[in-house]
Amino acid sequence: MVSIGNFATIDTNYTLNFLGFISLDCGISADSSYTDQTTGISYISDSTFIDTGVSKSVSPEYKTTKVEQQYWTLRSFPDGVKNCYTLRPKQGKGNKNLIRARFLYANDDQNGTVPRFDLYIGANKWDTVKLINESMTNTMELIHIPSSNYIFVCLVNTGYGTPFISALETRPLENSTYRTPYASLALHDRLDIGSQTNKSIRYKDDVYDRIWRPFNFVSYKITSTSLTVDANGHTPFYPPSSVMQTGVTTVNSSGPLEFYWLPDDPTSKLNVYMYFAEVERLQPNQTREFNISHNDAHWDGPIFPSYLYTTVAYSQYPVSGDKIDYTIYPTENSTLPPILNGLEVYIAVEMTQSPTDEQDVNALMNIKSKYGLKRNWQGDPCAPKDYLWEGFNCKYGGSDPLIRITSLDLSSSGLTGQMDSSFSSLTMIETLNLSNNKLTGPVPSFLSQLLFLQVLDLRENNLTGPVPADLIKRSNSGSLSLRFPPHFSSQSSLTLIQKISAGAALVLLVALTVLILSLRKRKKVEKANNAKSLKKIGSLEGKNHQFSYSEILTITNNLERVLGNGGFGTVYHGYLNDTQVAVKMLSPTSAQGNKEFQAETKLLVRVHHRNLTSLIGYRNEGEHVGLIYEYMANGNLETHLSEKSSYVLTWEERLRIAIDAAQGLEYLHNGCKPPIIHRDIKPSNFLLNERFQAKLADFGLARIFLSEDGTHVSTDVVGTPGYLDPEYYMSNWLNEKSDVYSFGVVLLEIITSRKALVKSYDRSHIVRCVSFMLKLREIKDIVDPRLGGDFNSNSAWKALEIAMCCTSPTSAKRPTMTRVVMELKECLVLELARRRDGYDLESKDSIELIFMNVNSEVTSPFAT
C-alpha cells in the first residue's frame, strides 16, 4: 500500500486554468461558445470535432438554473452505426487524461423510450450508456493515456434507440497520479466525505475539474475547519481544499470507521483512494494515528495525518469480491479516532483490442482532408472488425500488436489533383485502387517505397508518365500487378511504351532472345554439373571445384595471412584470379572436424542462396583438407556486436543483417528439398561482406531433415551453449524450430549487443535477462545504448517481440522463419520511414490505457 503526503512544495500559483481543457457543449450552433456561470469554464461547439449528427435542443422545461447549461442541447446520431469524435489533447500522447461524457435524454426524439447504446474509446468498448429515465442525467468518466496524438470517442447504435450526447470533456492529469498495475481505471464513485453544503465540487476548487459528490455517513461525526488545506499543493492528486476541510470521525475515540460495498460484479477489480487531512490543531498530549484493513487483512498504515496537509492512501493492487469491506481503526498510541475526508473508487479494466497503427491513421486523415472525402471515415479504421471502414482490409495479429492497413479502395471517389504523399505512409499496403478518378500529374516515385504493394490500379485517370523504374522492375518480376490508363497524358502525348522507338524495341527483342537462349543453356550446364557434384561428393571428386595443395599455397601466398581460428583449424586470406577468397584448412588432429568438413562440403555443393556463403572450391588430398569460400570483408557478426568494436552498427544495418540472416535460414528450411536444419546458429556464423550483407556460414553440424512424419527426428544434441533449443536439449528431438530458437537468441544479441550467456555467478541467459528488463524498463534502455536512442521505437519493440516469440521454451509456439522474415521486413519499413521523415513516428513507450465503467449506476459505500 502507498501513502502520499508531505511532497516537496509546489508553486502556490499552480493552476491548470484551462490549459489543455477540451470542453464541448454538443449540439450548440457552429462557432458559438460561452462561459459557464458556475465553473467559469469556456465551452465551445462540437461541430468541428465530428462530421455527422444532428443538433437538437431539449424541451424548455429542462432549460432552468437547476439543469447545467451543457444539458440544454445535444447531438443525436440517427444515421450510421458508429459516429465518432476526434479529440486532440494539447499535451499530446503519453499523457494522462480524464475524459467525461454527459447525457440527458429529455425525450429529444419524441419516442418516449429511453435509448441504450455503446460508447467506445478508439478500438475498444468503454461502456454501455444506460439512462434511468428521460429526466435523469448520466455522467461517465474514465482515465486514459493515448498512445497517439488523438482520441476517438465513438457512439455505437446497438438497435435500442438513437445514440446522443450532451457534453464531452477532457482534462489533463499528472502522470504520477492514479497508478495501478492495470493502469486502466473507470470511475465508480468520488465522494466529498463530511460535506456540509450538499453541493458537488468541481473546478475551480478542483484544478483537474473532477466532480466530487457530497456524501455523509449517518452514524459518524462531521469534523471541519475553515482554514485552507494544501495551500502549497503537497500531493500530485491536488484534492480540492473544500473537500479536505471536512471529514468524518467516530464518536468514540477508540472506535473504528467501517464501510463496505456490494459490487454488482464480484469479479470487478476496485482501486480505492482514501484522502486524509488533520483539520484540528492537536494538543501535545493528543495523537491521531490509525491503520487500514481490507476484509480483516492489513491494507495500509500506520497513518499520521498532517495538520492542513493531505495524505493519500491507495492500493498498489485492486481488490475484488462479493463484499468490499474496509476498516480504519486507531493504533494503541492514538488518543483520537480515525478521520476520513475524501474517497475515490475506480474499476480496473483490461482492454484487449489493439488499435490501428497511428502512422496509417494519420495518412488516412490527411488523405481525407486533401481530397475532401465525404465518406463516413470515423474512429479507428480497422477495429473492432464489426465496424471496419468501407473499402479497407487490415492485417490483424502477428508479432506487431498494432493493426495495419493492407488494402485501400478509393475507386470512383472523385479524387482530383496530384497523388498526395500521404499514400507513401501506408507502408504495409498490398492493394491500392485509385481507378476512375481525376488524378493528374506524374506517377509519383514514392510509390516505389511501398515494399509490400502487390496491386496498383491507376486506370481511368489523367496521370502522365514515366512510370517509376522500380515499379516497372517489380511488375516485370511478377511481384506487382500494374494497372495504368491507356494514355498517361492528354491529346497527342505518347505513352511510355510509345516513346520507345521501333528500332530500339527490335534491338531489345533480339537481346532478350539471346539472353533467354543463353540462360537456358547455362541452366542445363549448371544442372549437369550439380548432378555430377552430388553424385561424386561422397569422395569429393568434383573436378570443377578441386584444387591441389600447391594451388592453395599460391592462392594464400603460402598461408601468409590468418583470418581466424576454430576447432576445425585455421582460415586464411587469399586471391584467386584477382578475387579475394577465404581458405579454411582443416587441422590434421581434428577427427570431428573432418566429419564436419565432409558434411559441409556435401551441403554447400547442393545449396545456393544469396544469404548463404558460396563455396568456390575444396581440397581433399591426404593431410591437406580445405574449403575455399568467397571472402567476407567485414568478418563476422559477433565481432561487430562486441563492445570492443570501433564501429557501431546502426539500427537500420542491424535490421538488414537480421533479415539477411533470417532469409538464409528460411531458405534452408523451405527452399531445400528435403529441408536442412543448421543446428549451430550463432553470431560468429554470420559473415558480413563489404556492404554488410549477411551470409550464413559453417554448415558442419547441419542435418538434412528426412523425417517421414515431417515433424522431428531423433539425434544427438550438438550446438553451442547459450543457443541450444532447450526442448531439443532435453528430448533429443530436432526440427526446424530448434534453429528458430537459436535465431531468436541471435536477434536478441543484435538488439541489445549483450552476450547469449552473461558472465555472472549464475551465467544468466540473455532471454532471462531481457524478460526481466521488459518488466521494468523502456525500449531505449533495452536496445544497445551505443545507438543513443537513434531508432524508431516501434521498430525496436516489434523486433524485440519477434525475438521473444522465437525463444519461446515450447517449439510449437515459435514462428516459422518465413513469418520471421516478413515481420523483420516490417521493422525495417518503420525505421526507413523514420529516416525519411526525420523523426520517430510513434513511441510505444506510451501505452494506450482505456478505462471502462463496469457499473454506470453509482453504488455508495455503506457504513457498518
Image (cartoon, rainbow, N blue to C red):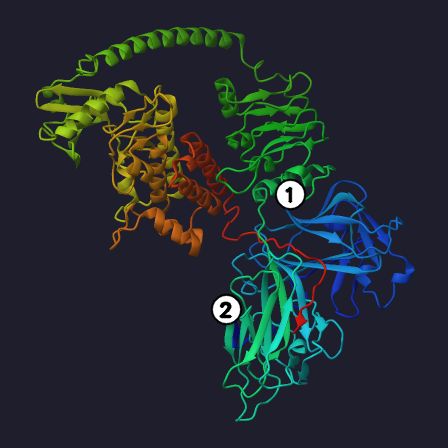
Query: For the residue marked with disc 2, what is the amino acid?
Result: Met
Closer to the chain start, of discs 2 and 1, is: 2
Q: How far apart, in angstroms, are the residues tagged by discs 2 and 1? A: 37 Å
Residue located beneath label 1 in the image: 380
Q: Residue 198 versus residue 602: which sits nearer the camera? A: 198
- Mark yes or no: residue 250 visible: yes
Structural crowding at the residue carrying mark 1, measured as other residues with C-alpha within 10 Å and reported as few (<14), some (14–19) or many (≥20): many
**Residue 70 lies in what quarter of the image?**
bottom right
Q: Judge the density around disc 2: few (<14), some (14-19), many (≥20) Cα neighbours within 10 Å.
A: few
Give x and y (percent) for residue 73.
Answer: 83, 56
Q: Secondary structure at mark 2?
A: loop
Eye-nearest disc, 2 or 1: 2
Give the vertical position of 861 relative to 803 (above or below).
below
Q: Nearer the viewer, residue 577 or 728?
A: 728
Q: Is residue 82 left or right of residue 354?
A: right
Decide if residue 696 is on the left or right side of residue 452: left
Front-most of residues 125 and 321 = 321
- The percent coordinates of residue 11 (x first, y second) are 57, 75
Mark count: 2
Quadrant (top left, top right, bottom left, bottom right) of the C terminus: bottom right
Q: Position of residue 225 (x, y in %)?
A: 66, 85
Please state which amino acid type lies under the numbered disc 1.
Answer: Asp
- According to the image, label 2 marks what residue? 1
